[in-house]
Image: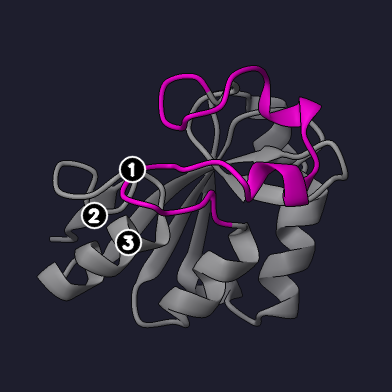
Amino acid sequence: MMIMGHRGAAALEPENTLLSIRKAMEIGVDAVEIDVHLSKDKEIVVMHDSTLDRTTNGTGPVNNYTLSELKKYDAGKGETIPTLQQVMELTDKKVSLVIELKEKDTEKIVVEQIKKNKIEDNVYVISFWHRLVKNV
């Protein structure tokens, strides 16, 4: 049996933040599921919704903002919106990553980052959009 933290430890800490992922790892999960979107400047950021409204003190679509602009928003408890790279560095093969692709044009960049970090054997890529997964 595999125990997975959905958006980290979202019941205990702000979802999809480094704090939440760290908490899930402390609890002892086998894997952490995260969601990713593209910023305006084509950086992969960890965020469930396509907008900032529900989980941050910002408003509007994630892809309307550059990474540096996104980093100014509070994602809960003073946490900023993490990048996929930050999550990969935090988890560092200690737990598996389950990366949900939420929009088109993310798959190639995500695969590049997976390969760059040499975690191909420790990551799962999922999506409701079957064409995105086919491209992985």
- Counting from the top left corner in percent of width and height, residue 81 is at 54, 49
Task: Judge the density around disc 1: few (<14), some (14-19), many (≥20) Cα neighbours within 10 Å.
Answer: many
The residue that label 2 is drawn on is 4
Q: Do tag 2 and tag 3 residues touch (Cβ < 8 Å)? A: no
Identity of the amino acid at label 3? Leu
Q: Say which of 54 and 107 sits in front.
A: 54
Instruction: Specify whether residue 91 is painted magenta.
Output: no
The CA span between labels 1 and 2 is 14 Å
Q: Say which of 132 and 52 sits in front.
A: 52
* Numbered disc total: 3
Residue at (79, 26) in percent of width and height: 64
- Counting from the top left corner in percent of width and height, residue 111 is at 73, 59
Q: What main secondary structure does the magenta stretch of the protein show?
A: loop
The quarter of the picture where residue 75 lies is top left
At numbered mark 1, what does the secondary structure look like: helix, strand or loop? loop
The residue that label 1 is drawn on is 15
The residue that label 3 is drawn on is 19
The CA span between labels 2 and 3 is 16 Å
Q: Earlier in the sequence, mark 1 or mark 2?
A: 2
Identity of the amino acid at label 1? Glu
Magenta residue span: 53-82
At numbered mark 2, what does the secondary structure look like: helix, strand or loop? strand
Horizontal relation, residue 21 to residue 13: left or right? right
Foreground: disc 2 or disc 3: 3
